[in-house]
Image (cartoon, grey):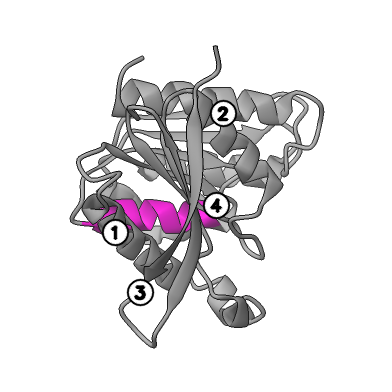
Amino acid sequence: MPKVFTIQPVVIAADADDVRLAGDLGLPEQPAGVVLFAHGSGSGRLSPRNRFVAQTLLEGGLATLLLDLLMEEEADDRRKVFDIDLLADRLVTATDWLARNQATKGLPLGYFGASTGAGAALQAAARTQQSIGAVVSRGGRPDLAGSFLSQVTAPTLLIVGGEDRPVIRMNAEALVLLTCPKQLIIVPGATHLFEEPGTLEQVADLARVWFLKHLGRK
C-alpha cells in the first residue's frame, strides 16, 4: 500500500532583510529522515520535476521540504539567482529550522540539489553545523561549490543524463574533488531536464534508495 502523508505550507524566516521563504513540508507517518530540496536557477518549490521526486521520497517514507530559496521579488534578480553563497546561506537557515521544527527535529537530514542548486547544497553540506547524512544531485553543477567540495562529508550521489555531455564532464571533475563516499550515475538517453520517458522515474528511484540507505532504514 502507498504511504500516507500530509503536505503543509510553511514560512521560514531568514536572518537578514526580513526575508521570508515559502515552502511545502511533506510528512509521512514515522519518517525515516527529511530531505531539503535546493532548486536550480529560475525554479522553486513548484518545479514539477522536483515535486515528482519529492512524491517518490514521501511514498518511500521520507519527509520532504520543497522551498523557495528566493522571495518572489528576488526571483528576477539574476545576481541572486546565480549567487551560490546566498542560496547556501538560506539552505543552512532552512536546515536549522528543520532541526528545531517539532515535526522534523531529530530526523536525519539530506539535501536534493538540481542544476545550480546542487552547488548550493554541497556548499551548505560543508558549512552547516547540523549533520547532513546524504546529498543527491540531479543534472547538477557540483563544481559551483568550489573549494567546499573537499569539505563535504555526506555520502553524495551525482545523477546526470547521458546526453548532457558538458554536465557529465563537470560532474566527473567534481567527483575527483569530493573526498566523501560518492558515486556518479549516468542515465542513458536522458538530457539535462530528464524529460525523456522513464528517465525522471529513474532519478527518483535512485534518490529514494540513496537517502534510505544513508538516512534511515533500507
Q: Which residues are magenta?
A: 117-128
Residue located beneath label 4 in the image? 141
Q: Quadrant of residue 116?
A: bottom right
Q: Position of residue 86 (x, y in %)?
A: 42, 73
Q: Is residue 14 above or below residue 97?
A: below
Under tag 1, what secondary structure? helix
The residue beneath circle 3 is 14
Between marks 4 and 2, how big is the CA–CA gap? 23 Å
Which mark lies nearer to you, 4 or 3? Answer: 3
**Outermost residue, bottom direction?**
17
Farthest residue, direction top? 1
Closer to the chain start, of discs 3 and 2, is 3
Image location (x, y in percent) of residue 110: 36, 41
- The overriding secondary structure of the stretch rendered in magenta is helix
User: Does the segment drawn in magenta span residue 122?
Assistant: yes
Give the CA distance from mark 3 to mark 2: 28 Å
